Image (spheres, helix red, strand yellow):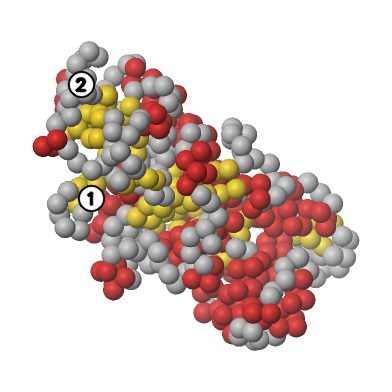
Amino acid sequence: MVKFTMDEIRRIMDKPKNIRNMAVIAHVDHGKSTLTDSLIAAAGIIAEEQAGDKRLTDTRADEAARGITIKCTGVSLYFNFTEEVPGVALPTDSDGHEFLINIVDSPGHVDFSAEVTSALRITDGALVVVDCVEGVSVQTETVLRQALTERIVPVVTINKLDRAFLELQLGGEEMYQKFVKEIENVNVTIATYRDDSMGEIEVGADKGTVSFSAGLHAWAFTLPLFGRMYAKKFGIDEKKMTERLWGDNFFDPETKKWTKTASSASGKQLQRAYVQFCIEPIRMVIQAGMNDDREKLTKLLGSVGVKLSTTDLEKSGKALMKVAMQRWLPAGRGLLEMMVAHLPSPHRAQKYRVENLYEGSQDDETATAFRKCDPEGPLLLFVSKMVPTADRSRFFAFAVCSPALCALEPRSAFSVPTTSQARRMTATSRTSSVCSFRWPERWRLLTPFPLATLSCLPVSTSSLPRPELSLTLKLAGLFAP
């Protein structure tokens, strides 16, 4: 059941501080679309049981047939931060606890790199998906470099942990060393291509900017989530507990103290905290589910306050394991929390992205409104690409626009000059147009995209529409008559 209404989405669109625009980028077959299913399921658009199998963002017949993403697909999700992660502090610059998260699922194949660029141009953050077995591949570095060039802030998820547990049956320490290496490889690319204007964007598991997931089985976790879980038990601060779950930190059960050495007071070998408190509990739940040990599974999940329904317990094997992990560590909750907490809002991102998107003077009215994300500024559009309709009779503009669009009344017309015309225009001659658009008398919102990212195309309200050039404008697949 969908967990939001169009009125709720429309209300959040007036709060640019509560919007997150992000693209999902990765090497081909690293699990972008299956992981995106989990995010969509968190908003109730598809059932949790379908997450990982539905591949909702693969909308074309050839995508379904080939099993790969070919074209970018956008979807908007509602996330109530207080309800989903109770007890966690809201981001400092947020305006309330409701968030609109606009996700663009992009292709991973090198032949479709142009689609990745189109997605990155209209977003402010990126979820970089890394296969935990294959690691950081060539295309992973390529799309990450593209994102950094566009001044996009990345967060990372190390995906396909189910392969590490079930297929390769890796030990906890071996997993940890692989994850450390993959995070270091990502940070090397970030350090090489990072723009100083973006600030510090290096990712780290203990910072909460790296998550661990199994997109096919729709579960994921971050260290802050386990940090909150164990903080009360150990009687320490949540942040300090999170930091102890990564790196060379070991808990000695003999002395009941934390240590930096891998041996106990009596000389016994100790497990790393990440392995002992994160990996091994997950392994126990997975093994109990795969072995149909319902009694043990019920006891394990009961210890963390999770109860499986009778219907859930009727499942067996992989299906039982999947539902158990979904109930305990739902992917949508962990990933959406990471995005809200660590990806920039349009209000913050436009301050350093204006130079990339706006080709005019950086001191004029348009650039100033861009930086401030000002709803009282000029009405602006950034058109990333044009998408033909199925019958090839017209185009939809894949675009984002300024908050000024919210104030438009039905049947109001506005003009869109080309970029070359925009450069030649003076402040008093911006009513010249190439194409004019008119809102229909009745229009409705479909999964609306943000109205808070501004653009490099000045747009002026005009009373001189040109019907022979008019198009039905569908912004990022979001508005329709």
Q: Is residue 142 visible?
A: no
Disc 2/disc 1 C-alpha distance (Å): 25 Å
Q: Nearer the viewer, residue 184 or 358?
A: 358
The residue under the point 44% across, 47% down is: 102
Quarter of the picture holding the N terminus: bottom right
Q: Is residue 439 visible?
A: yes
**For the residue labelled by badge 1, is the local secondary structure a helix, a strand or a loop?**
strand
**Circles 2 and 1: CB distance less than 8 Å?**
no
Residue 431, disc? 2
Horizontal side, residue 163 vs residue 73: left or right = right
Q: Could you tell me residue 296's position as x and y percent? A: 75, 81
Viewer-nearest of labels 2 and 1?
A: 2
Where residue 340 sits, quadrant-wise, is top right
Residue 459, disc? none
Instruction: Reply above or below: 132 against 410.
Output: below
User: Which amino acid does the dot numbered 1 rest on?
Assistant: Val
Where residue 29 sits, quadrant-wise, is bottom left
Q: Could you tell me residue 189's position as x and y percent? A: 42, 48
The residue under the point 76% across, 65% down is: 305
Horizontal side, residue 242 vs residue 255: left or right = left
Q: On the image, numbered disc 1 is attached to which residue? A: 387
**For the residue labelled by badge 2, is the local secondary structure a helix, a strand or a loop?**
loop
Instruction: Reply above or below: 6 against 258.
Output: above
| Residue at the extreme left of the image, as rendered | 468
